[in-house]
């Protein structure tokens, strides 16, 4: 039997280092890390590293250290890239 929670954690680790783009192909940066709801294990946010200048004019949340935070709920597809719905971020 496969433990779904552990499987999700393994799958989420595979996102680190993937390029984050909008549905229209605008590059946001790279997945540096993620935040989780500790009780449920639900992915909450993607923490961007190597942010592009494109996101500077968007009203994307930042943490205390100035890292850009993308809500995981805005992710629409994961493959070679992590594709997010820009309208769900703003």
Image (cartoon, rainbow, N blue to C red):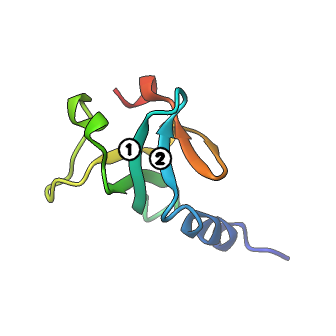
Q: x and y percent of residue 16 in the render? A: 49, 65
The N terminus: image quadrant: bottom right
Place residue 50 in its image quadrant: bottom left
Q: Residue at x 43, y 51 (%)?
A: 44
Q: x and y percent of residue 26 in the render? A: 44, 33
Which residue occupies the foreground of this view, 51 or 44?
Answer: 51
Mark 2, Cα crowd under 10 Å, few <14 / some 14-19 / many 20+, is many
Q: x and y percent of residue 80 in the render? A: 64, 53
Q: Residue at x 72, y 66 (%)?
A: 4
**Total numbered circles:** 2
As drawn, which residue projects farthest toward the right?
1
In the image: residue 84, left or right of residue 60 = right
Residue 89 appears in view: yes
**Where 73 falls versus 31 (above or below)?**
above
**Residue that carries the numbered disc 1 in the rendered image:** 70
As drawn, which residue projects farthest toward the bottom?
1
**Residue that carries the numbered disc 2 in the rendered image:** 20
Q: Residue at x 14, y 56 (%)?
A: 64
Place residue 76 in its image quadrant: top right
Place residue 2 in its image quadrant: bottom right
Q: Are marks 1 and 2 in contact (CB under 8 Å)?
A: yes
**Where 31 falls versus 13 (above or below)?**
above
Whole-number angstrom distance, CA of label 1 to CA of label 2: 9 Å
Which residue occupies the foreground of this view, 40 or 30?
Answer: 30
First along the sequence among labels 1 and 2: 2
Q: x and y percent of residue 78 in the render? A: 63, 48
Element at badge 2?
Answer: strand
The numbered mark at residue 31 is: none
The C terminus: image quadrant: top left
Q: Residue at x 35, y 56 (%)?
A: 47
Which residue occupies the foreground of this view, 84 or 42?
Answer: 84
């Amino acid at each position: 039997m496969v433990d779904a929670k552990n499987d999700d954690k393994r799958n989420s680790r595979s996102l680190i280092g993937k390029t984050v783009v909008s549905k229209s192909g605008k590059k946001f940066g790279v997945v540096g890390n993620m935040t989780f709801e500790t009780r449920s294990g639900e992915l909450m946010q993607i923490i961007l590293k190597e942010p592009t200048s494109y996101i500077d004019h968007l009203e994307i949340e930042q943490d205390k250290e100035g890292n850009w935070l993308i809500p995981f709920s805005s992710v629409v597809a994961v493959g070679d890239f992590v594709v997010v719905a820009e309208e769900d971020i703003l």
